[in-house]
Structures are given as structure tokens and as C-alpha cells.
Image (spheres, helix red, strand yellow):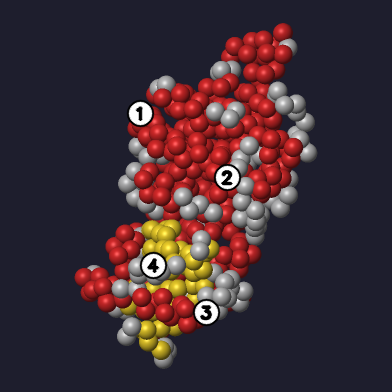
């Protein structure tokens, strides 16, 4: 464990590309997500308590629970951090692929980088798996957790809702187009053990993924998880009014791209934002604080 | 020769001292603050599983919905919503893992369902069941009053929870 949860929440940025990109999604659920930073500030917002003595008691209990590795909160943070590392690598690979296509003497880049659509679909799958595993480590639901997870996802709000919206928008719709859910299923059904082993996310998170680090177990978890999320993910965009037109205008305010280069925009966002880790930290802090105030 | 040996010993001692400092520095940050002099509880992982505590939660009344939102060792939480809006958070925790939580009930003058009750900050009310389980209702906003909290605490299956406490 490198940093404790109070340090992580205290160091969340109040501005920058991640916060701007998340702000674009406000229209999906207006006012649901506020960029709450600072641990004591989060305690006051989540519990409604402002007395310094009370805030301090909640903080101490929250830090105690976070420090206990058996309680899963640290693992959730690791999962959210791992998926960002893998995402940045994918963004760089996607950029290299594009550059390889455009510039003839760099065409070897085109050959050594994996086909775009497939790697984007695998990235989306990994993000969704990270979301389900991160949620279960934070909030419980023992066993395979998928059924309970889907029930709980139905009542997603605040940081959780904005993160899932961002995954679907920035890692689904933007790079893969409106039929992203179908593409996701196609590529996930063709996954094999070596795809899992090659995945940067798996390499970073294998010790804490269900299946105890075995690529075979992870593969069956990924296909099972994505299979059970398929219809939910496919309907999510429609239900929440997420469309390409809805975000492109806002996105052009800070990323320079044309409408036929959406994969550029997606790659740029993958490299320059860390919205999963950002909102994941906020989600873990919220659950931890809600529990701490119930236990003091 | 002696000088050389001395320098060598000094270098070695320096190296080990440096390594020691480095190891100490690299140790993970202890996130557990030494809080109070309260008696230490049982390890969190050995507390009553949240799944066992779930059954003591109340049924949702008309117009309200109860959604379980967190279930951990010694802790279970449900959100109470009214017309889709969260109005309160209901929790049960096993104080065996955090015994200092029982202190506030020692001076309790009020009872709910026959169990001692105490305020938790400005927006929370709790009861202690069987000297072990803390049941808490916390308002999400001022519209859910202290009286609402007490009414919802009384709806918990407190007697059943007391049985779980006796089984332990």
C-alpha cells in the first residue's frame, strides 16, 4: 500500500482534462456527480456532519477500515489504478497504429500494433470487468458477485454512475461506434487465454482478480461477466440518452479532431485522462465513510 | 592494514545503517491510527458476516424502497429511498470489532424497542442490541427527522438481532 485513502482523496485534482471530460457527461444525470476532493470535505458531504470532533472520529475509523487489507477497499483502489495503466498503454498503441497508417516510413508501427477494433473491444471489456470487481471489493457481495452486482448496478448513482457512463461513452461509443455492445460481445467471445495473459490490465491486476491469478480462470470470469452485462450495457446508452452528437460538441472544446477521427479522440482521452481511478477513488471513499459513520 | 580494516568496517556499518533506514522508509504507511485507549476489538474479518445481519433489516413501508448497498465483515448497509430519492441510510454493525462504539450508550436515557438509544452526531440515531450490534439510522437530509429515524429503528427486527447476539 503506497498511499492511504485520505492522501488519495486529498490529492485528487479540482480541474484538468479528467475533470473536464467527466463534466461533459453531466447531461446524462444532471447534478449527480460533483467533483468532491479532500477527505474531510468528503466526510462532511457524505454524512452531513460538520462538527470537527465527529469528523475526526469518522476519519479515524475510515482509515482503520482502509488499512485492514481483509476489507477489500485497498484492492478496489488497486483495480481502478491498474485499469488506468493499461488504458494509457492502449491509447499509445492506438496512436501508433494510426500514425503507422498515415506515414509510410512508419508503416511498421501498423504491423506491430494490434488491430484497432479488437484491442478497443478488449479494453472496454477490461474496464467493465474492473468496474464489477472494484464494486464488489468496495461494497461486498461475496462469491462470483455478478448477479448481485447487476442488481446493485441498477441503483448506481453519483461517482459510480458517472464512471460507468464515462466507460460506455469514452471506451465504447467513441472508439467503437453506436453498435459497440455487439462488437464487444463478438470480440469477447473470441478471446483466448493468451489475450488475457497479454493484457496489461491482467498483468497488473491478476493477483487480485477472481481466479487467483490464473489466466484461464480470468478468461471465464471475463466472458461470464461481460455476457451477463451485455444487455445492460447495450441499453445503458439509450436509457441515459448517451449519443455521439451529445458529447462530440463538448469534446471538441478541448480535443482537436474531426468527426471521422473519433478513434484519435478516444486514444487521446485514454492517454491523458484517468477518470476510472479518479471517480473510483471517490466511490471507495464514499462507501468507506458511510460505513465508518455507521460503526463509530 | 588496521586502517583499511577500520574503513571497511565503517563502510559496512554505513551500508547496513543505510539499508535499515531504507527498509524502514519503504514500509507501507500504517493507516491504522492509534486512536483511543479503548479496548481492542476482535479482528474485523472475524466479526459477524454482513449477510447474517441483513435479516434484521425492516421491510420497506408503502412509498419507500430499501436497497442493500454494502455488505462486509461486521457491517451491513441499506439505502432508504422515497419516490426514488435517498432519504436515509440504515446500517447494522458488529461493535465487537470496534468496542468504543458502545461507550455512547452507557449514559443513554432513552430506549427504542427496549434497547438503549443514543444520538450519533447531528443526523444519526442508534440503538445497541444485545450489547453487541449497533443499529443506526442516518438522515440524508433534514426532511427525515429524528422522529423518523426513531420510527425506522423501531421497525428493525431488533429481537431477532438480539438472538444473533446470544448465538455468538
CA distance separating discs 4 and 1: 42 Å
Q: Secondary structure at mark 1?
A: helix
Circles 1, 2 touching at the beta carbon (< 8 Å):
no
- Above or below for A108 versus A38: above
Q: Chain of mark 3?
A: B
Task: Name the residue at 27% across, 77% down.
Answer: B159
Label 4 belongs to which residue? B60
Q: Which numbered disc flags the more N-terminal residue, 1 or 2?
A: 1
State the quadrant of the C terminus of chain B.
bottom left
Q: Which mark is residue B145?
A: 3
Q: Earlier in the sequence, mark 3 or mark 4?
A: 4
Residue sitting at 69 percent across and 47 percent down?
A23
Real-space CA distance between mark 1 and mark 2, rounded to the nearest whole angstrom: 35 Å
Residue A216: numbered disc: 1
Q: Are marks 4 and 1 on the same chain?
A: no
User: Badge 3: few (under 14), some or many (20 or more) residues near its Cα, within 10 Å?
Assistant: some
Under circle 2, the secondary element is loop
Q: Which mark is residue B5?
A: none
Q: CA distance from mark 1 to mark 3?
A: 52 Å
Marks 2/4 same chain: no
Position of residue A59 in the picture relative to residue B137 (left or right): right
How far is mark 3 from mark 4, CA to CA? Answer: 18 Å
Q: Residue at x 39, y 70 (%)?
A: B61
Q: Could you tell whether A145 is left or right of A248 in the image?
A: left
Amino acid at each position: 500500500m503506497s498511499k492511504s485513502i485520505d492522501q488519495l482523496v486529498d490529492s485528487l485534482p479540482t480541474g484538468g482534462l479528467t475533470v473536464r471530460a467527466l463534466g461533459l457527461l453531466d447531461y446524462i444525470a444532471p447534478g449527480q456527480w460533483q467533483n468532491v476532493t479532500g477527505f474531510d470535505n468528503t466526510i462532511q458531504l457524505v454524512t452531513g456532519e460538520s462538527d470537527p470532533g465527529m469528523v475526526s472520529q469518522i476519519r479515524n475509523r475510515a482509515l482503520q477500515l482502509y488499512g485492514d487489507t481483509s476489507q477489500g477497499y485497498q484492492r478496489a483502489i488497486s483495480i481502478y489504478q491498474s485499469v488506468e495503466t493499461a488504458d494509457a498503454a492502449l491509447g499509445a498503441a492506438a496512436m501508433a497504429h494510426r500514425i503507422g497508417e498515415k506515414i509510410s516510413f512508419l508503416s511498421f508501427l501498423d504491423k506491430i500494433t494490434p488491430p484497432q477494433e479488437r484491442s478497443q473491444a478488449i479494453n472496454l471489456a477490461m474496464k467493465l470487468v474492473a468496474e464489477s470487481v472494484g464494486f464488489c471489493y468496495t461494497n461486498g457481495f461475496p462469491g462470483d458477485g455478478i448477479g448481485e452486482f447487476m442488481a446493485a448496478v441498477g441503483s448506481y448513482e453519483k461517482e459510480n454512475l458517472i464512471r460507468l457512463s464515462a466507460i460506455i461513452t469514452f471506451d465504447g461509443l467513441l472508439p467503437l461506434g453506436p453498435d459497440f455492445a455487439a462488437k464487444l460481445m463478438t470480440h469477447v467471445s473470441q478471446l483466448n487465454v493468451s489475450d488475457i495473459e497479454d493484457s496489461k490490465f491482467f498483468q497488473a491486476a491478476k493477483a487480485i482478480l477472481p481466479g487467483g491469478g490464473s489466466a484461464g480462470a480470468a478468461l471465464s470470469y471475463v466472458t461470464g461477466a461481460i455476457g451477463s452485462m451485455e444487455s445492460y450495457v447495450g441499453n445503458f446508452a439509450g436509457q441515459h440518452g448517451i449519443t455521439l452528437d451529445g458529447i462530440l460538441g463538448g469534446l471538441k472544446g478541448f480535443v482537436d479532431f474531426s468527426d471521422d477521427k473519433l478513434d484519435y479522440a478516444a486514444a487521446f482521452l485514454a492517454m491523458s485522462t484517468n477518470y476510472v481511478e479518479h471517480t473510483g477513488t471517490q466511490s471507495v471513499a464514499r462507501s468507506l465513510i458511510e460505513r465508518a459513520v455507521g460503526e463509530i | 592494514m588496521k586502517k583499511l580494516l577500520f574503513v571497511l568496517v565503517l563502510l559496512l556499518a554505513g551500508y547496513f545503517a543505510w539499508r535499515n533506514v531504507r527498509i524502514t522508509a519503504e514500509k507501507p504507511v500504517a493507516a491504522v491510527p492509534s486512536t483511543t485507549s479503548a479496548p481492542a476489538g476482535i479482528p474485523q474479518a472475524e466479526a459477524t458476516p454482513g449477510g447474517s445481519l441483513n435479516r434484521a433489516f425492516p421491510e420497506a413501508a408503502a412509498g419507500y424502497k430499501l436497497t442493500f448497498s454494502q455488505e462486509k465483515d461486521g457491517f451491513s448497509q441499506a439505502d432508504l429511498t422515497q419516490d426514488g430519492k435517498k432519504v436515509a441510510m440504515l446500517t447494522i454493525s458488529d461493535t465487537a470489532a470496534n468496542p468504543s462504539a458502545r461507550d455512547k450508550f452507557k449514559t443513554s436515557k432513552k430506549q427504542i424497542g427496549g434497547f438503549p438509544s443514543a444520538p450519533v452526531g447531528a443526523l444519526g440515531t442508534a440503538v445497541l442490541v444485545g450489547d453487541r450490534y449497533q443499529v443506526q439510522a442516518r438522515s440524508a437530509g433534514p426532511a427525515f427527522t429524528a422522529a423518523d429515524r426513531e420510527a425506522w429503528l423501531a421497525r428493525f427486527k431488533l429481537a431477532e438481532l438480539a438472538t444473533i447476539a446470544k448465538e455468538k
